[in-house]
Image (cartoon, rainbow, N blue to C red):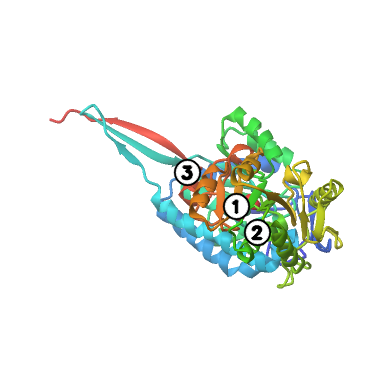
Amino acid sequence: MKLVEGAPTEAAIGEGWVASDRMFEVHSPFDQALLATVTDCQPEHARDAADQAVKAFAAWKKTTPFERSAVLRKWYDLILAKQDVLARLMALEMGKPVTEARGEVRYAAGFVEFYAEEAKRVHGETIPSQFAHKRLFATKQPVGPVYAVTPWNFPAAMITRKAAPALAAGCTMIVKPAEQSPLTALALAALWRDAGGPAAALQVLPCRDPVPVSRVLIDDDRIRKLTFTGSTEVGIKLYGQVSQTVKRLSLELGGHAPFLVFDDADLDQAVREVSSAKYRNTGQTCVCANRIYVHERIVAEFVERLGAATAALKVGDPLDAATQIGPLVDRDVFGKVSAHVADAVDKGARLVTGGKPLGGTLFAPTVLAGVDPAMRIMREETFGPVAPVRAFRDEAEVVQAANDTRFGLAAYLWTKDLSRAFRVSEALDYGIVGVNDGVPSTVQTPFGGVKHSGLGREGGHWGIEEYLDVKFISMALQRGT
Ligand code: SIN
């Protein structure tokens, strides 16, 4: 059953769209409206998809990079042409404010455009030999069929950030989208087919319970890579499971980003960048600022200005173009956000603004002052619109506090002092550092973390390497006559 336009509701398996007796419902997190009932894939669907992905790989890997590039380019054009439809789907199924969702569609399409070009730049090497009759080469080949597990917070971009480089490299991919956001994934698969892409090269298996479906694909020796974006807890389990079939692995896991504001900061600009880093996607990104450290000389003024900017954010219906903060995706996320705020206030934090539910899963954007390291919010990823602010005294102390976590995805700092910008960005144990920049992600740069935030990089020329194996060819020449 389909109540919203723009997306199929059946699984994209092989050449077809596969319906099933078992379906699951997709609801809007804003008003709980039923949006669609979608095929609930089971292990047998996963086995079928694996067979199809293997068959499709045999043909797709033999196409030239120029042929693959042309299909990707067409997919890019179609995604952009459907920008409004895709943005609306995301606003409906996971609550992203529609203006921001349009930005996500452009971000998602950007990966497809980038890898359409990058397909043609997968170069090998010739290696000097100590033997006169030998020629040595290193070439690259696609790793094989890939299994991708994607999150709900970027229903389009986290698919294209994986699928575009994989398909450009000559791999095929089976995507298991998050149960909260299957419709955008299915819409992208439909556009891939419309672009002339082989249907079985990009299959989508929606399911309510990912475990049995994932088990089939993880245990299948023919699937040669797993790429996962999601929580560190699930990532650690998957890391163990893929070892049994020695798959290649990319993990983009949780974060707990610190934002360091030094006392030379331009306060208006610092507040603007902290707000972008914090409230983007209603605080539901892995790179959202989770802890804000502000120099003690300016902290009072900063808190006042951040509080005013936060109180002015427009909260509400994600389909309203003026909305800046939408609903949290579900009750679990809402529960954790509420618990972090309650814990901080119980332990002595001051509520500057927000801190309360606004109906359904809407949560008022919140600023907390006077937080301390014993509070949950200073140790765990919140994934919601809450900005805890703590004062610091000097650079060494704040760098130590910023690094005192098992996470290492993104960190930010604001300073006008060039030497400090270098010193601190080098000292932060993170995969991404934004200097005076609260939104550093772009398609052509490496995205990924260190420590418990993951393995591998997505985006840029690094992103396609994750889908390529190096093959060494040694060629001995016959003696000439
Ligand atoms: C994420 O939250 O995993 C992605 C955020 C981004 O691409 O900036």
Report, in whole angstroms, how far the alpha carbon at label 2 lies from the one at label 3: 33 Å
Q: In the image, which disc is placed on residue 274?
A: 2
- Classify mark 1: helix, strand or loop: strand
Q: Are marks 2 and 3 in contact (CB under 8 Å)?
A: no
Residue 82 image-quadrant placement: bottom right
Q: Earlier in the sequence, mark 2 or mark 3?
A: 2
> Which label lies toward us, 3 or 1?
1
Query: Extreme left residue here?
Result: 481
| Residue found at x 69% / y 43% | 231
Q: Which residue is mark 1?
A: 412
In the picture provided, is 388 more to the left or to the right than 422?
right
Query: Extreme front residue here?
Result: 297
Q: Earlier in the sequence, mark 3 or mark 1?
A: 1
| Residue found at x 52% / y 57% | 112
Q: Are marks 3 and 1 in contact (CB under 8 Å)?
A: no
Asked whether mark 1 lies closer than 8 Å to ligand 1, one says no
Residue 469 vertical position relative to residue 64 in the rendered view, above or below: above
Label 2 crowd (10 A; few <14 / some 14-19 / many >=20):
many
